[in-house]
Amino acid sequence: MIFALMGLTTYGILHDYQLLISIGHILLLPSVGLWYAIKRNWSWKSIDKTMYLAFALGSFADSVILIDWGRTGEFLSISIASMMHLLIIIVFRKEGTRIYSDKMQDLPKIAIPFLFIFFFFGYVLMPSVPDSIYLVSIMYALLEVLLVSHGFFRIATGKSYLWVIFGVIMVLFKDAIYSFHFFIYNNTKIYLYAIQYPANILAYYMIAVGVAINQNNRKAISKLSIWIYIKNCFKLLFHFKNFTHFRRTLIRKSILPLPKNLANSQIG
């Protein structure tokens, strides 16, 4: 459903069908949130509630940009998208992620997103950004550095880590295309938006997949740990060596020699 709706929205963007564009912008991110909820079996833990709220805000950010409010619509869209990124950062931190390391090989995890956003926003985008959204754009850029760095530093492993890595990299890509389309070319290159918006949905879908896998794995490990603990207790209790040790102990106690005074008293 998500990918079919992405295709219809892209078709609407390219052929200027406002109905398809509006339906896609309103429903796509909630559909990703719905997928996440189904994948998590409608869990209502703290991380899950934060993810649900993030996708609800993302839908609002996408919808606001469609309203013909001029720069006000762009300001609201960027502000709400910043809040969505902040919520995703909170999710990463709830998972246990911290941006800290004394290893030199971890330096690119901070340097790459920082340098990319610094040069792109500083030298390419900012000269074209209107004054009305200048400050909110800087705030968005800072949160994006934190988002990508937290994605790189996640403590998750395997598929969960890879999904989120591809997701945050896609966030950088889609925001670069967004900036070219809206600020540098002033919404005149519609094909750029036809690339950017599906990339936008795909980025957050990848992040949702990574977080869902990690949460499901933690639940499975927790259940497995309890089962292993019970199993080990039974093994310890009913192990053959324990029975033989107990029997040997009883036999040894029964054949212990009596003290001489007690032996003489019994003989007398």
Image (cartoon, rainbow, N blue to C red):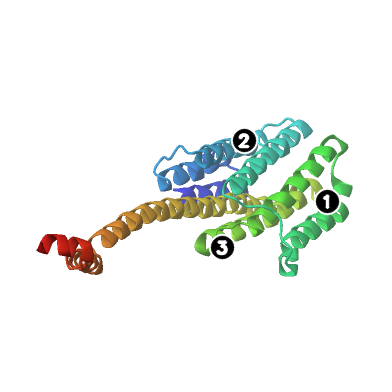
Instruction: Using residue 224 as the reference point, say whether residue 98 is left or right of it.
Output: right
* Label 2 or label 1, whichever comes before in sequence order: 2
Going by the numbered disc 3, the residue's amino acid type is Leu
* Label 1 or label 3, whichever comes before in sequence order: 1
Q: CA distance from mark 1 to mark 3?
A: 29 Å
Going by the numbered disc 2, the residue's amino acid type is Ser
The percent coordinates of residue 218 (x first, y second) are 46, 53
Residue linked to disc 1:
125
Q: Is residue 108 above or below residue 41?
A: below
Which disc is residue 63 wearing? 2
Q: Are marks 2 and 1 in contact (CB under 8 Å)?
A: no
Question: Which residue occupies 49% across, 54% down?
Answer: 214
The percent coordinates of residue 97 (x first, y second) are 62, 52
**The image quarter in which residue 251 lies:** bottom left
Query: Callout 3: 10 Å neighbours few (<14), some, many (20+)?
Result: some
Between marks 1 and 3 in the image, the one whose residue lies nearer the viewer: 3
Going by the numbered disc 1, the residue's amino acid type is Leu
Instruction: Using residue 42 as the reference point, say whether residue 75 is left or right of it.
Output: right
Q: Is residue 238 above or below residue 77?
A: below
Q: Secondary structure at mark 1?
A: helix
**The image quarter in which residue 133 lies:** top right
Q: Is residue 40 above or below residue 154?
A: above
Q: CA distance from mark 2 to mark 3?
A: 29 Å
Residue linked to disc 3:
162
Instruction: Using residue 103 as the reference point, say whether residue 266 is left or right of it.
Output: left
Q: CA distance from mark 2 to mark 1?
A: 23 Å
Query: Callout 1: 10 Å neighbours few (<14), some, many (20+)?
Result: some
Q: How many marks?
A: 3
Q: Is residue 265 above or below residue 94?
A: below
Task: Please state which of residues 99 and 66 is positioned toward the viewer in this rendering.
Answer: 99
The percent coordinates of residue 167 (x first, y second) are 60, 56
